[in-house]
Amino acid sequence: MAYIGKSIESGTFSVLDTSGNTYNGSNTTFSLGSQVGSPAQLLVSHDGVLQKPGTDYSLASGGTQITFSTAPASGASIFIVEISGAVGGPLASDLNGAELILDADGDTSITADTDDQIDIKIANTDHIKLATSSGDTVIQPTTDAKDIIIKQFDGTELVNFNDGAYSSFTSAAVNPEATLTDGSTVSWNALTQPVCKVTLAGNRTLSSATGGVTGQFISILVIQDGTGSRTITWNAAYEFKDDTAPTLTTTAAKGDIFVFRYNGSKWLEVGRNQNLTLS
């Protein structure tokens, strides 16, 4: 009987040449003579019985071999057809700028018809492009006066990159407090430890905070240990009012907070709060 129904519009069925394989009742892995992306791309007949992908056989060597779960008997008749593109085959095509339609009604797509740029369209409106500038990755809206919004799974807005040239956060933007390693010289990385604390177990020197970005604010909580009366020698990169470094609180277990702003060469103190009870 002739086939009834809509014909396959794309894809091919290819009989694989497995004539070089020898079935001896022992070997389980054989050459396909081609590279296949998925076991589901194959129709495998073993002595007239169709085999189930993933159960009766799998792929090996990057898809160039087939492995049977049970070794075919000596003289077995194995017939393999590769389904390419028509049913479940991988997309292995150079689109060369053609639009890739993603949804059923054809109004959501991805295109790369502009060199080195990917455009994403949603609901028939260009929304965003991915591009590069001097090696950097650029994510940019392609519709004017629209925001980029990041939401939680339940739809709660977290961040709004507003078209008015500002960003808003509905939840706190937090720099987790880092604990600096106490020692004769205390090191501080302003890039990875912008908010930090250190407990002094002796008289210390605080090195200049590294990794600073001009305009950056950083904060340090200096805590006296159970003995107290510990001192800090501040690196010359820290600038205080009247060029006078502060005297730390001497009481055991109390803390002093200092906040600085970086001007590109110096950390300028913008505030302090001392003699704090911390628990």
Image (cartoon, rainbow, N blue to C red):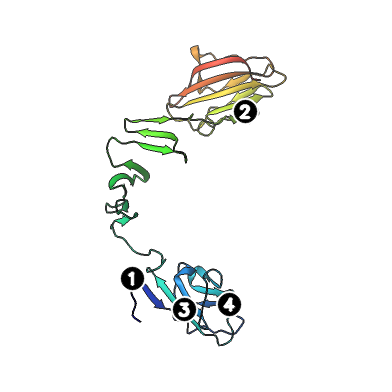
For label 4, the SS is loop
Left of 91 or right of it: where is 232? right
Left of 222 or right of it: where is 154? left
Is 92 above or below relative to 213?
below
Q: Position of residue 25 (x, y in %)?
A: 61, 83
Which quadrant is home to the N terminus?
A: bottom left
Is 112 above or below relative to 185?
below
Q: CA distance from mark 4 to mark 1?
A: 33 Å
Q: CA distance from mark 3 to mark 4?
A: 15 Å
Name which residue type carries label 3.
Ile
Name which residue type carries label 1.
Ile
Q: Nearer the viewer, mark 4 or mark 2?
A: 4
| Residue to which mark 2 is pinned | 185
Sequence-first disc among 3 and 2? 3
| Residue to which mark 1 is pinned | 8
For label 3, the SS is strand
Name which residue type carries label 4.
Thr
Tell which of 43 and 210 is nearer to you: 43
| Residue to which mark 3 is pinned | 80
Q: Residue at x 68, y 19 (%)?
A: 253
